[in-house]
Image (cartoon, grey):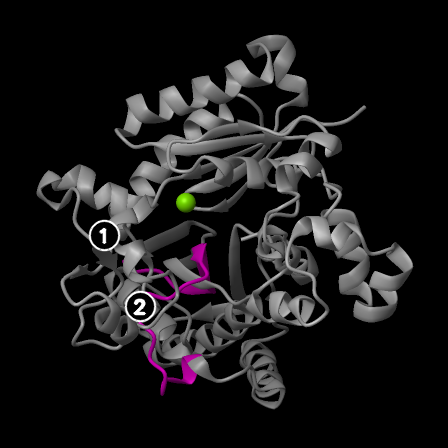
Amino acid sequence: MSRIILHMDMDAFYASVEVHDDPSLAGKPLIIGALPSERGVVSTCSYEARPYGVRSGMSIKEAYRLCPNGIYMHGHYHRYHEVSDQVHEILLSYTDQIEFIALDEGYLDITGSIRLFGPPEKIGLEIKKRVLNATGLTCSVGIGYNKMTAKLGSEEKKPDGFFIFDSPEHFQSITKERPVRILPGVGVKGAARLASFGIQTVGDLRSWSRQRLEKTFGEFGSDLYLHCRGYGSDHVSRLGEGEAKSIGKEVTYQRDMQDPEEMHSTLKLLASSVSDHLKRHEFYASTVTLKIKYNDLSLHTRSKTLDNPVRSSHDLYQISLALLNQAPLKKPVRLLGISGSHFTTTPIYQYSLDEDEKRIDPEKQEKVEKALDQLSARFGKGVIQTAGEMDSKRILKEKGLL
Ligand SMILES: [Mg+2]
């Protein structure tokens, strides 16, 4: 039986939250990320900024050149998380077969929800209404028989959109004249490559045989063959099922530790390890959590949610050190851990000269892991535990859907 997949996407999320909180910003080109005098990238812009050519991920400098009259500001991440939590709560009332792709976006498999909540159209419109009532913000909802068609459905009438793709035939008739760029995995480069073969539209792509596509474009070609016909994955995981919630590392000591210097160097190594994991997944963490277990096994965790998501070992170290300094260290410590969560894929500030931008150095990573081993060993038979080890392939696959 074919599945019924719903994709919900808040409209210009960060910008909409800002306008909601300060209505004087309404109708103005709003660019969130950094100030024109700073180094940074566009995190989100309002619809009014888009006609100027401003796009997410673009450098602030470039955005300022295109739109000097825009209003530039830093994001208020605490607020975005707050609103995101409200939206997630609504979505979770329909199913736990749900994948949150970003703060403002998620896939739901509502196949099993229909019996309880009514037909797909009713569920989709109800979600839009409930999100608006709870947050004052609009979202777009798409419904399809797989993830790709659900996502394209939510984009079809954006903003405040609602659209259903009910069959591959329907998909094919709607997308015939659309540019190939709408298909997942087709970026600027991919589109240029296809154009060099005279393929501009989804319809053009369909005139190529599977064999010819595969011969010309390899694996990309077989994906294209399926996607241009409206076929693709319809698997939505259950909540918590192999999903990346946090990336962390912890060290358990076999005997008590009280020396602050030892704890600091432990944090430094943990930060470096977590940083490498984040970079591998191309994530920035907007929440950093420090975990301390005392020798009586009592647990102390403290988190800091940041306005600027981080992933460099320097930042992770400084934040976890600040959290450690706030902790009541009256008892000896048996375990220290650092983790990052609430991931974003776009940094707010981009320090191009920072270590952040360097690729992971496997040699360095090996050194860090070795040092963690040695550190544990110094305190007896150390056990190194990795918290939240993720299936990186899965995450990257999901990222491809962003
Ligand atoms: Mg969105």
Q: Is residue 355 magenta?
A: yes
x, y percent for residue 105: 47, 42
Q: N-terminal of the two: label 1 or label 2?
A: 1
Please give the residue where the numbered disc 1 appears in the rendered image: 76
- For the question of whether residue 160 can be seen, the reply is yes
**Residue type at tag 1:** His
| Point 13% across, 62% down: residue | 69
Q: Are marks 1 and 2 in contact (CB under 8 Å)?
A: no
Q: Is residue 390 above or below residue 164?
A: below
Q: Is residue 123 above or below residue 108?
A: above
Q: Is residue 72 magenta?
A: no
- For the question of whether residue 253 can be seen, the reply is no
**Residue type at tag 2:** Ile
Dot in front, 1 or 2:
1
Depth order, front residue of 35/51: 51
State which quadrant residue 287 falls in. bottom left
Relative to residue 61, is residue 216 drawn left or right?
A: right
Where does the magenta region start and end? 328-356
Q: Mark 2: few, some, or many residues within 10 Å (few <14, many ≥20)?
A: many
| Point 57% across, 58% down: residue | 387
